[in-house]
Amino acid sequence: MPRTRSLPEAEVLERALYVFWARGYDRASIADICDATGLGPSSIYNAFGSKIELFRKSLAHYLGKYATLATEHLDDAFHAHESMRNYLRGIVRLCVMPNTPPGCLLMQSGGAGIPEDSEACAATNEIKTVLTQSIRNVLEARHTAGDTLSASPGTLAMFVVATTRGISQLACDGVSEDELLCVADHAAMSCIKQ
């Protein structure tokens, strides 16, 4: 049994985050989290209340520390293909970052094989909905500014999120960063009418 000790919450969240990121929410056990943090189950439950609450806090930690590598590039000051290229290249960097699990936590923990009514799926879907809307907003602004899009902003936003999911899975499958960057660049160019 792990010994009871105290860690700063940010460190517990970072360690738990890596477990969720590597295994997905449903495959991550409290025992896995205890092994990663060195804390006992009672310490985890006393501090966070439940596995899903720990996951939600880990998600918030992930969004603040890691996901910004991509989302900081959702800027309508750039042409549509530039903004989407920068965003998708940020996704590639996130998915292949050294010393972290491959892929994207949002895609790993709320994707295929996860029951749609699971709490983890609901938590990640909320974030994916906001992300999709943010992408759509950038594309709508660029369309209004005169960029010629290859489809509606809503369709392209879903395409970019689907590409994000694909990049995440390909990173988990061991595809190289250079190949993923080519995918990102091609997808971004597909957003504008040629």
Image (cartoon, rainbow, N blue to C red):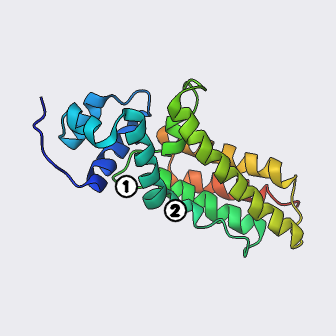
Callout 2 secondary element: helix
Residue 178 pos. (x, y %)? 54, 56
Residue furthest toward the bottom?
A: 77
Q: Quadrant of residue 142?
A: bottom right
Q: Residue type at mark 2?
A: Thr
Residue 167 pos. (x, y %)? 58, 46
Q: Is residue 19 above or below residue 164?
A: above
What residue is drawn where x is 28% and y is 32%?
A: 32
What residue is drawn where x is 58% and y is 67%?
A: 72
On the question of residue 70 being in view, the answer is yes
Q: Is residue 3 above or below residue 72?
A: above
Query: Which of pointers 2 and 1 indicates the residue nearer the eye?
Result: 2
Residue 91 pos. (x, y %)? 56, 55
Q: Earlier in the sequence, mark 2 or mark 1?
A: 2
What residue is drawn where x is 42% and y is 35%?
A: 52
Residue at mark 2: 68
Q: Is residue 105 above or below residue 186?
A: above
- For disc 2, the neighbor class at 10 Å (few under 14, some 14 to 19, many from 20) is some
**On the rendered structure, is 105 left or right of 51?**
right
Callout 1 secondary element: loop
**On the rendered structure, is 17 left or right of 91?**
left
- For disc 1, the neighbor class at 10 Å (few under 14, some 14 to 19, many from 20) is few
What residue is drawn where x is 79% and y is 57%?
A: 191
Quadrant showing the N terminus: top left
| Residue 98, numbered label | 1
CA gap between label 2 and label 1 equals 16 Å
Q: Residue type at mark 1?
A: Pro
Q: Is residue 94 above or below residue 24?
A: below
Quadrant showing the C terminus: bottom right
Residue contact between numbered discs 2 and 1, judged by CB atoms under 8 Å: no
